[in-house]
Amino acid sequence: MNNASSALKVAAGIFLTIALITIVVILFVSAQEATKTAQNNFSDIQTELSQASFTVYDDTTVSGSQVTNALRKFKDRGEFGIQIKTGKNSGGQWYGDILRISGPLTNEEYGSVSGRSLADIGNTWNEKLNEYVNPSGKFKAKVIKDNSNVVRGIIFTQTTVAP
């Protein structure tokens, strides 16, 4: 009788141990899936925040002073270029990196970095040069993304010449 009682206690202990291990494994697997979901959501939020600084420039009309502010703001950003097309320089000048644009400037164009521009942003303040950006001028802004939907640059095209 004593042996039977001991055997039942040992069996119950083993059964409880197996049940506890099973519960821990189930909790771990569900926690792992929740963690993956949270990481994906966090990654999406991070991407949205990093792109938010460019939404101001996406298909909008901005002033010349906003153009030069954008140039100062993004000048040291890697893998990024800004092209400014003025009334005197319709071909445009790249600052930062030079982008190779594939496709027409529609909603479907993609850009990839093809080299570094040696242009001096100080030229945008010199009224004697073709690269001069009139602070009162109006510019149409277009954000350029790559095939991975990462913003690679902005093109500013002057639409009106201010007096």
Image (cartoon, rainbow, N blue to C red):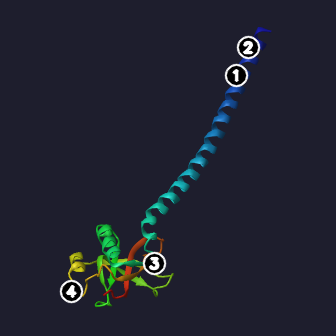
How much space separates mark 2 and mark 4, taking CA atoms? Answer: 98 Å
Label 4 or label 1, whichever lies nearer to me, is: 4
Asked whether the residues under the numbered discs 3 and 4 touch, taking CB atoms below 8 Å apart as contact, a structural biologist would say no
Q: Would residue 99 appear left or right of 10 to someone viewing this image?
A: left
Label 2 or label 4, whichever lies nearer to me, is: 4
Could you tell me which secondary element the residue under label 4 belongs to? loop
Residue 16 percent coordinates (x, y): 70, 26
How much space separates mark 4 and mark 1, taking CA atoms? Answer: 87 Å
Could you tell me which secondary element the residue under label 2 belongs to? helix
Give the mark nearest the N terminus, 2 or 3. 2
How much space separates mark 1 and mark 3, taking CA atoms? Answer: 71 Å
Tell me if residue 99 comes above or below residue 12 in the rendering.
below
Tell me the residue at 76%/18% (across/down).
8
How much space separates mark 3 and mark 4, taking CA atoms? Answer: 26 Å
Task: Characterize the local packing of mark 4: few (<14), some (14-19) or many (20 or more) Cα atoms within 10 angstroms.
Answer: few
User: Outermost residue, right direction?
Assistant: 1
Give the mark nearest the N terminus, 3 or 4. 3
Give the mark nearest the N terminus, 2 or 4. 2
Tell me the residue at 23%/78% (across/down).
125
Residue designated by label 2: 6
How much space separates mark 1 and mark 2, taking CA atoms? Answer: 10 Å
Q: Would residue 111 appear left or right of 74 to someone viewing this image?
A: right
